[in-house]
Amino acid sequence: VWRANPARMTYLFIAPVLFLLALFTPPSSPFLLPPLASPSSVRSGLPSRSGVLQNDGGFVLRSKEATHDVKSGFEGDVDPEELAVQARLAEHQKEAARLDFPTAVRSLVQYQHGFAVLSTNSKSSPGFPSGSVVGFAPDPQGRPVFIFSGMSSHTQDVLVDPRVSLTVASKDFKGAADGRVNLVGTMERVRDEKELEECKELYLQKHPGAFWVNFGDFNWFRMSVSDVRFVGGFARAGSVSASAYSSASPDPIAGFGGAIARHMNEDHMESTVAMVKHYVGVDVESANIGAVDSLGMDVVVARTPKGADQPQQFKIRLPFTRPVTERGDVKNVIVEMTRASAPPPAA
């Protein structure tokens, strides 16, 4: 098959990469690639773009970050039907409702399982970084709170140099398509008695089995955040200012969205497949919900491009028909969308 039509087969392998990059790119993002408008635009290849420094809702998209330089570099006929599907999907995803960056970051940090990688400047190996997996809990401003043993190397590091960063991955992180955030700032030891009690209460809410909070050789620390770097998946990345991060509130639905996703995936996947077809306009073979928030769902779908013999997986955004704020609202809007997506009864 490859030898019979190399241009067609090359397209089937490369085209999914092109629209994956467009799927998750906000309209204002410097990562935005030109739409897949015509066969000639695909054949000519896509230029890399450095972007323009922009401010939107408190977050900054860096102007000179590395972008994906994807070029097709081949000649041949592109199936117009498959091209139309990809263009329709890319256009829908550009306009799909998503959490803004500050809210997405605060939600990720708030609802994560409470463990992350703390990077410090090593005391024992000057000039080298050191990394430790540590437990933490965010306070109401999103500042991570820790309790460290005096014997730990990272404790010794921050007492010498308080500059640190904390890399937090989403609760169900599995790969590059999933969200992660890097918090940069300084560590300080908490000494005020009232603040110590507040730190203990916060930490035990996240880590109820942390019996070591009462050990005499453990001390409380809190990280003041000065910079936030966020990667929400392919081609969705940028920075959030410290003030935007601290003033944002976690999404009210994201905290229990995982339970909703599991229920839908286990018992109602056919409904999700139907909703993708109805609202996004694309036929898919499977649709697994990865995350749910007040504006919609992140869904990993599989479809086989026309002329291919293997399905390809990618993530899309399936917005709700209206914002929701409570668990009951989520159920109601999913039921409404499922009913609207159901095929008409046979005559």
Image: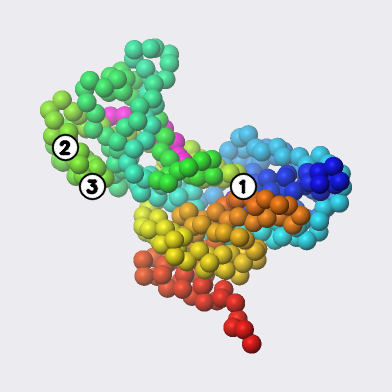
Q: Which residues are magenta?
A: 180-189
Amino acid type at mark 2: Phe
Disc number placed over residue 211 in the picture, else none: 2
Spot occupied by residue 215 in the image (x, y as percentages of width and height)? 13, 30
Q: Is residue 186 magenta?
A: yes
Q: Is residue 16 magenta?
A: no
Distance from disc 3 to disc 1, alpha carbons, whole Å, reads: 37 Å
Residue bearing the label numbered 1: 29
Nearer to us: label 1 or label 2: 2
Circles 3, 1 touching at the beta carbon (< 8 Å)? no
Amino acid type at mark 1: Ser
Residue 123: quarter of image: top left
Residue 200: quarter of image: top left
Which structural element holds mark 2? helix
- Quadrant location of the C terminus? bottom right
Q: Is residue 259 left or right of residue 178?
A: left
Disc number placed over residue 205 in the picture, else none: 3
Spot occupied by residue 249 in the image (x, y as percentages of width and height)? 37, 53
Residue 116 or residue 48, whichever sits in front: 116
Residue at (65% x, 52% y) in the render: 311
Disc 3 or 1, which lies upstream in sequence? 1
Q: How is the image coloured?
A: rainbow
Disc 3 or 2, which lies upstream in sequence? 3
Is residue 219 depicted above or below 282 in this figure? above
